[in-house]
Image: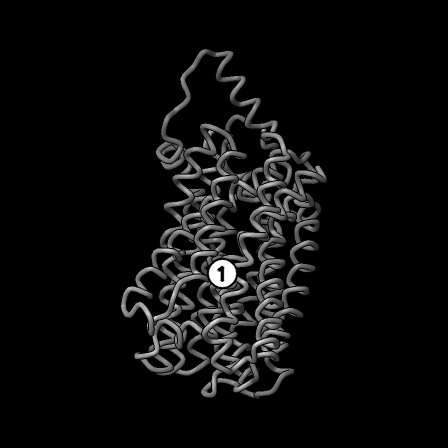
């Protein structure tokens, strides 16, 4: 289990590090590098629009990699997702800006961002299944937090690398804008090597092996379409689980992308870039602690109970967040960002066990990945994209109201799902 936990954690950490350095760059430098002709506000909206492209590609990745993961094994799909993510991220770091390539620069950026989303769409489900299908019933929440720590560690690493490169090259000078921001992207190729070593060192999950052996004993031909199977057998779980994690996406990307831009913007809080990045490091540590604690708590109190508590807290905090930020200052920003990510962490911790437990083995990779990715289309793709425009026209409370609506929707969906903490992933049919 230690080897499995390490492989799942290091893989998702690298994948989400790659994913989040894009979000950080989208907030800090991409408007100037790829959209300079649009101006500050429109350039930021365009930059976040490219961020959202990944969330459209995610469901496609979850279906494609879920298909191969359910038919050929979890491990093979996970190796491919890591390679695609690493190559796409490195190429972004080498991509010339609009000053050199003109309109082709943002077009290529969108293609590479879509490749990142495609890879992450297959990554999360495979990594969580790697731990969930190795873990014993009763302790699955404890072990399934390891891939869930990937976003926290990835955000920590992305904030640190941008902080260090900014300090080396200067956070506001042309050297950082032209070259410094590229270093975190290019370094990704080194991390991919570590991730490949970890992924190749673990065995296929025992649950997948048993399912394959059972099919061979029956001399039956496995279905060639896990996607159609899950839609026929468990469409309700796919849709409700997607709705249940919408709040998680909206809170996390509002914290990691939108608030990074809002905190440094002269029309926002006007804080220095090192201050915002440093507070991001602190918030990511607290977020990781919340993920680990919530995952363990879900083994005792249940997945639904812990996620429900987070949704209720999120509903309240959404309406408090922007009045707090409007007070101004470092303390207000630190409190707003940290509490936002901690609430997300409490909800995110149990999901690594909750979603795999909802679906049958024969299409578990596809079902869990599809639900996770669909939740990202609204929560991670739409909310951060429309937030700048809503803020400019209606103010911060309107953005908070939008976050509150995602929390309410997730609360309703989670309460409509069954409790799964005592369910074995070896069950042939998921009870509904």
Residue 131 point in image, percent of width and height: 62, 39
- The answer to whether residue 147 is visible is yes
Query: Viewer-proximal residue, 97 or 56?
Result: 97
Q: Position of residue 140 (x, y in %)?
A: 66, 40
Mark 1 burial class by Cα count in 10 Å: few <14, some 14-19, many 20+: many
Looking at the picture, tell me which residue is in the foreground, 361 or 186.
186
Q: Residue at x 42, y 83 (%)?
A: 395
Q: Residue at x 60, y 34 (%)?
A: 133
Against 391, residue 201 (above or below) is: above
Q: Position of residue 139 (x, y in %)?
A: 70, 40
The colour mode here is one colour
Residue at figure coordinates x 37%, y 54% from the top left: 114
The answer to whether any part of residue 336 appears in the image is: no
Q: Quadrant of the N terminus?
A: top right
Above or below: residue 280 compared with residue 423: below
Residue placed furthest toward the left: 103
Residue 6 placement: quadrant: top right
Tag count: 1
Q: Is residue 381 above or below residue 167?
A: above
- The residue wearing badge 1 is 247
Label 1 secondary element: helix
Q: Position of residue 136 (x, y in %)?
A: 68, 34
Q: Nearer the viewer, residue 313 or 8?
A: 8
Q: Is residue 151 left or right of residue 219?
A: right
């Amino acid at each position: 289990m230690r080897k499995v936990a390490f492989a799942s954690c290091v893989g998702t950490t690298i994948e989400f590090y790659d994913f989040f350095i894009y979000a950080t760059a989208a907030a800090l430098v991409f408007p100037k590098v790829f959209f300079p002709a649009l101006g500050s506000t429109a350039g930021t909206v365009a930059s976040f629009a490219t961020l959202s492209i990944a969330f459209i590609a995610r469901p496609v990745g979850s279906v494609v990699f879920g298909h191969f993961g359910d038919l050929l094994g979890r491990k093979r799909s996970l190796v491919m997702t890591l390679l695609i993510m690493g190559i796409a991220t490195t190429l972004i770091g080498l991509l010339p800006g609009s000053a050199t390539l003109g309109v082709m620069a943002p077009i290529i950026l969108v293609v590479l961002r879509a490749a990142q989303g495609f890879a992450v769409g297959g990554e999360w489900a495979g990594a969580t299944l790697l731990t969930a299908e190795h873990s014993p019933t009763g302790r699955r929440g404890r072990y399934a937090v390891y891939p869930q720590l990937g976003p926290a560690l990835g955000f920590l690493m992305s904030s640190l690398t941008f902080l260090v490169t900014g300090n080396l090259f200067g956070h506001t000078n042309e050297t950082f804008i032209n070259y410094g921001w590229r270093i975190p992207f290019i370094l990704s190729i080194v991390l991919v090597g570590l991730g490949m070593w970890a992924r190749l060192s673990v065995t296929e999950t025992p649950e997948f092996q048993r399912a394959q052996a059972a099919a061979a004993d029956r001399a039956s031909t496995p279905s060639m379409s896990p996607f159609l199977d899950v839609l026929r057998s468990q469409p309700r779980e796919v849709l409700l689980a997607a709705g249940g994690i919408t709040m998680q996406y909206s809170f996390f990307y509002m914290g990691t992308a939108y608030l990074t831009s809002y905190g440094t913007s002269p029309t926002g809080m006007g804080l220095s870039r090192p201050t915002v990045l440093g507070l991001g490091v602190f918030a990511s540590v607290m977020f990781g602690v919340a993920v680990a604690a919530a995952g363990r708590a879900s083994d005792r109190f249940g997945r639904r109970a812990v996620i429900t508590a987070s949704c209720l807290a999120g509903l309240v905090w959404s309406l408090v967040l922007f009045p707090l930020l409007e007070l101004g200052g470092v303390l207000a920003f630190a409190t707003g960002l940290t509490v936002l990510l901690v609430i997300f962490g409490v909800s995110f911790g149990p999901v690594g066990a909750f979603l795999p437990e909802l679906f049958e083995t024969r299409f578990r990779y596809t079902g869990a990945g599809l639900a996770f990715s669909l939740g990202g289309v609204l929560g991670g793709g739409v909310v951060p994209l429309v937030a700048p425009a809503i803020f400019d026209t209606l103010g911060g409370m309107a953005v908070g109201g939008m976050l509150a609506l995602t929390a309410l929707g997730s609360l309703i969906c989670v309460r409509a799902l069954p409790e799964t903490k005592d369910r074995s992933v070896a069950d042939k049919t998921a009870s509904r």
